[in-house]
Amino acid sequence: MSAQAKTVRVTYREAMRQAIREALLRDPRVFLMGEDVGKYGGCYAVSKGLLEEFGPERIRDTPLSESAFVGAGIGAAMGGMRPIVEIMTVNFSLLALDQIMNNAATILYMSGGQFNIPLVIRMTTGAGRQLAAQHSHSLEGWYAHIPGIKILAPATLEDARGMLWTALEDPNPVLIFENGALYNMEGELAADAGAVDIEKAAIRRPGTDISLITYGGTLGKTLEAADELARAGINAEVLDLRTLRPLDNAAIIDSVTRTHRALIIDEGWRSGSISAEISARIMEGAFYELDAPVARVCSAEVPMPYAKHLEDAALPQPPAIVEAARAMVGERG
């Protein structure tokens, strides 16, 4: 037998499906619920085929009421189950914000530690698919403001495959934000890929001249920008946050301490964003390591347009990342 690890070629969508299927096989308490997850196979085809394999008791189509089915998921978790609740898009999750913020995130504390909520909520986030303003925003930074929940943003096949099981083992609520532009991303994944750590950021490309800090749907664009910067003689480090709450503060500070420059790339809006929080933490923890002010590349502060050229203009793109990074590295003393 070859010592080389076997790999399979999969899409991000297929990696997520494998993760859900494995969870259903491993633990009879796990079930999937949400709009169109059963007969239709999921609005993004992530759950396609699972109803036929596991039946309607474990792949449960719900009425079109986010507040109702997220609340049902919370109740099931309190009752000893391990529900995976799918919300079609992050914009629609606002209809369940009361359940997520006032119930899921607070019941452990308000019960004096008596009731855990081992609930996983998956939802699609991000733009780039011409789905306009009610289906395209990146609101995971909003949720990262709330104590009592974890916020995951898988950007790689390994994380799409492995974060779910780790999340299901957590005794408290975990929200997984899947950027819709990644579902068709294809690549090689280890055949025996399994659970991954959900506490630590990951250096996707080491570097010495500038830290490019990002997550989710902008990781690929940031790596593309780093390649372009390398051709210009700038060695950029790319840090994938992976988890937005709790942030891996040590990894952020360590990276900035190595490179002495920080550029944050965030598909969310600039004002009040997760990029603003990261910038503040860098100023608090590594101010004297900086050779240039912290900078950000974020989405334009407009409702996401439908027209393709306007949508592209509203989103962070590799040329804007390159331009910002070159301006910062050019500020050497």
Image (cartoon, helix red, strand yellow):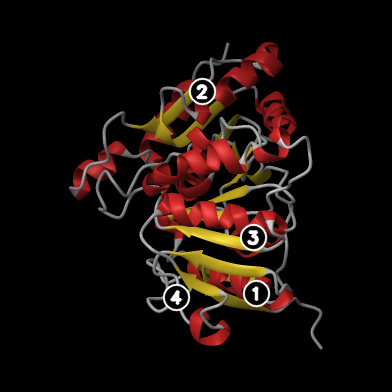
Q: Residues within 10 Å of mark 1 (few under 14, many from 20)?
A: many
Query: Label 4 belongs to which residue?
Result: 38
Is 63 on the left-hand or right-hand side of 28? left
Q: CA distance from mark 1 to mark 4?
A: 14 Å
Position of residue 12 measured from the top left corner of the image (x, y, whole percent): 51, 65
The residues tagged by marks 3 and 4 sit, at their Cα atoms, a distance apart of 19 Å
Could you tell me the amino acid type at mark 4?
Answer: Gly
- Tell me the quadrant of the picture where the N terminus can be found: bottom right
- Residue 181 in the figure: left or right of residue 330: left
Q: Which residue is mark 3?
A: 164
What residue did someone put label 1 on?
A: 24
Residues at marks 1 and 3, CA–CA distance in whole angstroms: 11 Å
Residue at 37% in and 66% down? 43
- Which is more toward the observer, 17 or 103? 103
Outermost residue on the left side: it is: 307
Examine the image and state in which quarter residue 299 appears: top left
Residue 35 occupies quadrant: bottom left
Element carrying mark 4:
loop
- Ranked by sequence position, the earlier of labels 3 and 2 is 3
In the rendered structure, which amino acid carries the disc numbered 2?
Ala
The answer, for residue 120, to whether it is visible in the render is: no
